Amino acid sequence: MYMRYFSRVFSAMAGPRPVVLSGPSGAGKSTLLKKLMKEYDSVFGFSVSHTTRNPRPGEENGRDYHYVTREVMQAGIDNGDFIENAEFSGNMYGTSKAAVQDVQAKNLICILDIDMQGVRNIKRTDLNPIYISIQPPSLEVLEKRLRDRKTESEESLQRRLHAAKVEMEFSKEPGAFDVIIVNDVLEDSYGQLRNALLEEINKVKKINMSS
Ligand SMILES: Nc1nc2c(ncn2[C@@H]2O[C@H](COP(=O)(O)OP(=O)(O)O)[C@@H](O)[C@H]2O)c(=O)[nH]1
Ligand SMILES: Nc1ncnc2c1ncn2[C@@H]1O[C@H](COP(=O)(O)OP(=O)(O)O)[C@@H](O)[C@H]1O
């Protein structure tokens, strides 16, 4: 009885659990997380990663990513500024400690969009997130979506498809993810994502109402 009370108080003090979204490039992670942040703008905050890749049209420095050179990124890593970092498709990506702290300081649920190397590395930290895998219905559908998105060169597209096969295999490893969502019909996948997070969403709403 008391134990339950204290663990509830403790988890409220520790703040809401972060959420990791992972899965192949083109599976729909940013589409789903943007929908979620639009519906629950006072509940979720995005962990803005650093990357050495170029911004795409419509992307904004500081909102989608912090766009940096390899030299700046490496200096930050050497300085211990990053929770995790990885090389993906010829570019560096990483989650800075500040990116997560900025969101947690606002008492929001921190969402991380990271690849499988990031998932592996975050599991070695004490972040304790909910791990959600977003998967495409098939490799063929994934390729079509990536081509239709028109953001990648042929070379970049091929690298992403190669990485996607490995990401799809990884998601099948027992215990890799808490929830796996196959993003076929967007509204259905979004409903599944919202359901998976409803408990945490309600916790944050309750905390924010009482403060
Ligand atoms: N490990 C790690 N992966 C990241 C990070 N930020 C983004 N990624 C992953 O890098 C991959 C490429 O991202 P991006 O270039 O935005 O392409 P997109 O996924 O096709 O939109 C995706 O799998 C992202 O989840 C990060 O901070 N750390
Ligand atoms: N359920 C879906 N049905 C059809 N197209 C989708 C669906 N989900 C996402 N897309 C489209 O597929 C492309 C890849 O989605 P995106 O969110 O950019 O993937 P990721 O962030 O995982 O790389 C985008 O052009 C997006 O509009």
Image: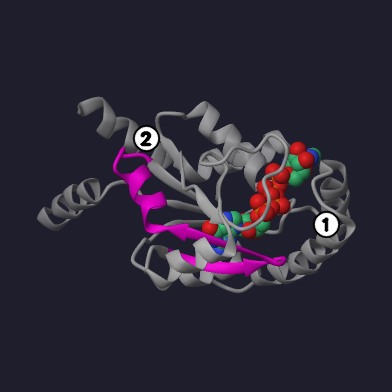
Image spot of residue 163 (x, y percent)? 74, 68
Magenta residue check for 132? no
Q: In the image, is 35 to the left or to the right of 40?
A: right
Residue 62 shown left or right of residue 127 in the figure: right
Residue depicted at x 18% and y 52%: 10
Which residue occupies 81% across, 51% down? 152
Residue placed at 41% from the left, 73% from the top?
Answer: 124
Give the residue number, with chain letter if any, for mark 2.
202
Q: Secondary structure at mark 1?
A: loop
Q: Name the image colouring.
A: one colour
Q: Looking at the picture, does residue 173 appear above or below residue 203?
A: below
- Disc 2 marks a residue whose amino acid type is Asn
Label 1 CA crowd tier, 10 Å (few <14, some 14–19, many 20+): few
Q: Which residue reaches farthest left? A: 2
Residue 92 at x, y = what percent? 60, 64
Residue 205: x and y in percent read 33, 31
Amino acid type, callout 1: Ser
User: Dot 1 corresponds to which residue?
Assistant: 138
Q: Nearer the viewer, residue 107 or 130?
A: 107
Position of the C terminus, as image quadrant, is top left
Q: Give the magenta range.
A: 83-108
Disc ID at residue 11: none
- Residue 84 part of the magenta segment: yes
Dot 2 or dot 1, earlier in sequence: 1
Q: Quadrant of residue 32?
A: top right
